[in-house]
Amino acid sequence: MLLSQNFTLSELCKSQTAERKGLLNLPDTDQIEALEKLCAYILQPIRDEFGSFIVSSGFRSPELCVAIGSKITSQHTANNGAAAADFEVAGHDNYELCKWIEANLPFDQLILECYNGEPNSGWVHCSYADEGRRETLTYSKAKGYRQGLLKDG
């Protein structure tokens, strides 16, 4: 099922952990609608601007969240009309990618995760919700979550 011009439901639900543990990782109708909005407002515009990229983590069922040590309230579960994805765009610095998203897209939450100043370090977490908060954060294991997009990880 196509969620946008270049993103499918199966790629946003793909999980090696779910496959390995035999977990179903399938969204319901409301969750699919949230994923369609994530693709329309966040992922497809990034693809149009920067070219092809792979979503490393999209939809997660509550069972998958538990299996990977995440919270079942994560926006990756596409509940309450919000949905999230983790990704990188090859050849583009994740900090610079976050700055472009911040300036151009109607995100709910944007997190620069595990970035250490090296262009290929870390990844981007971005969510969409109809009434987005426009919250920007930087996360590192050493410093936890901090407000804003910070180059020092």
Image (cartoon, rainbow, N blue to C red):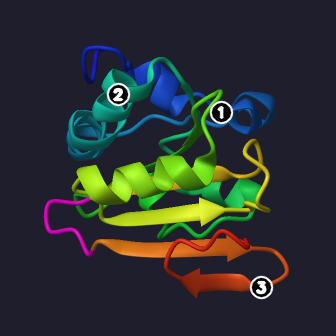
- Residue 131 belongs to the span the image colors magenta: yes
Determine the residue positioned at 44% across, 63% down.
110
Determine the residue positioned at 74% across, 64% down.
69
Residue annotated with mark 3: 143
Q: Nearer the viewer, residue 36 or 126?
A: 126
Looking at marks 2 and 3 on the same chain, the residue that comes earlier in the sequence is marked by 2
Indicate the quadrant where residue 18 lies: top right
- Residue 99 belongs to the span the image colors magenta: no
Disc 2 crowd rating (10 Å Cα; few below 14, some 14-19, many 20+) is: few
User: Does the CB distance between marks 1 and 3 fall below 8 Å?
Assistant: no
Question: Quick one: SS at disc 2?
Answer: helix
The amino acid at mark 1 is Ser
For residue 15, the mark is: 1
Tell which tag, 2 or 3, sits nearer the viewer.
2
Residue annotated with mark 2: 49
Say left or right for 44 vs 62.
Answer: left
The amino acid at mark 3 is Lys
Please, is residue 139 above or below residue 129 in the view?
below
Q: Position of residue 46 (x, y in %)?
A: 37, 34
The amino acid at mark 2 is Glu
Looking at marks 1 and 2 on the same chain, the residue that comes earlier in the sequence is marked by 1
As measured in the structure, the alpha-carbon distance from the residue carrying label 1 to the one carrying label 2 is 26 Å
Please, is residue 59 above or below residue 134 in the view?
above
